[in-house]
Image (cartoon, grey):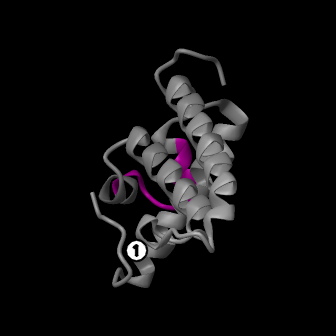
């Protein structure tokens, strides 16, 4: 499975983004459990082989989606090493976003494991 980095080829970035968006589209209609890799690949207009070149399975794709969302939520805030009295007022916002992301991750994980219906 390819890993994401800033030096990653644009074609790889684009394909991974197409697969992410296609998976979201299909999962919103069918739910995670009912979504197949073939449907994701067709929606992204790539082959199943291309899907597997980027993700081991749909669980790895789901993990990528959750990680990306988590990074998007926390990226506006300073790293832990830079917290001080001047920016401490931001902590409740960080805490709120973290709780939201944790809830989102748990719900998707439960859905992926079949513990709840999506």
Camera-nearest residue between 44 and 90:
90
Q: Is residue 39 above or below residue 4?
A: above
Residue 45 makes an appearance in the image: no
Q: Is residue 36 above or below residue 67?
A: above
Pinpoint residue 78: horizontal percent, then vertical percent: 53, 71
Does residue 60 appear left or right of residue 97 in this picture?
left
Residue 1 makes an appearance in the image: yes
Local packing at callout 1 (Cα closer than 10 Å; few below 14, some 14-19, many 20+) is: some
Majority SS type along the magenta span: helix
Q: Residue furthest right?
A: 29
Q: Residue at x 61, y 38 (%)?
A: 104
Q: Is residue 111 above or below residue 80?
A: above
Q: Which residues are magenta?
A: 39-49
Q: Which residue is mark 1?
A: 12
**Residue 82 highlighted magenta (yes or no):** no
Quadrant containing the N terminus is bottom left
Q: Residue at x 62, y 55 (%)?
A: 94
Q: Is residue 53 above or below residue 102?
A: below
Pinpoint residue 81: horizontal percent, then vertical percent: 41, 69
Camera-nearest residue between 56 and 113:
113
Quadrant containing the C terminus is top right
Q: Residue furthest left?
A: 1
Q: Residue furthest top?
A: 115
Does residue 55 appear left or right of residue 101 in this picture?
left
Pinpoint residue 97: horizontal percent, then vertical percent: 65, 50
**Residue 46 highlighted magenta (yes or no):** yes
> What number of labels is visible?
1
Image quadrant of residue 45?
A: bottom right
Secondary structure beneath label 1:
helix
Image quadrant of residue 3?
A: bottom left
């Amino acid at each position: 499975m390819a890993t994401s980095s800033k030096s990653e080829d644009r074609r790889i970035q684009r394909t991974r983004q197409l697969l992410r968006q296609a998976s979201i589209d299909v999962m919103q209609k069918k739910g995670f459990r009912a979504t197949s890799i073939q449907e994701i690949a067709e929606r992204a207009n790539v082959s199943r082989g291309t899907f597997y070149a980027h993700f081991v399975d749909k669980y790895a794709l789901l993990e990528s989606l959750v990680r990306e969302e988590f990074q998007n939520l926390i990226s506006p805030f300073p790293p832990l090493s830079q917290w001080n009295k001047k920016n401490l007022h931001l902590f409740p916002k960080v805490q709120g976003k973290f709780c939201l992301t944790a809830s989102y991750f748990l719900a998707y994980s439960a859905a992926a494991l079949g513990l709840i219906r999506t």
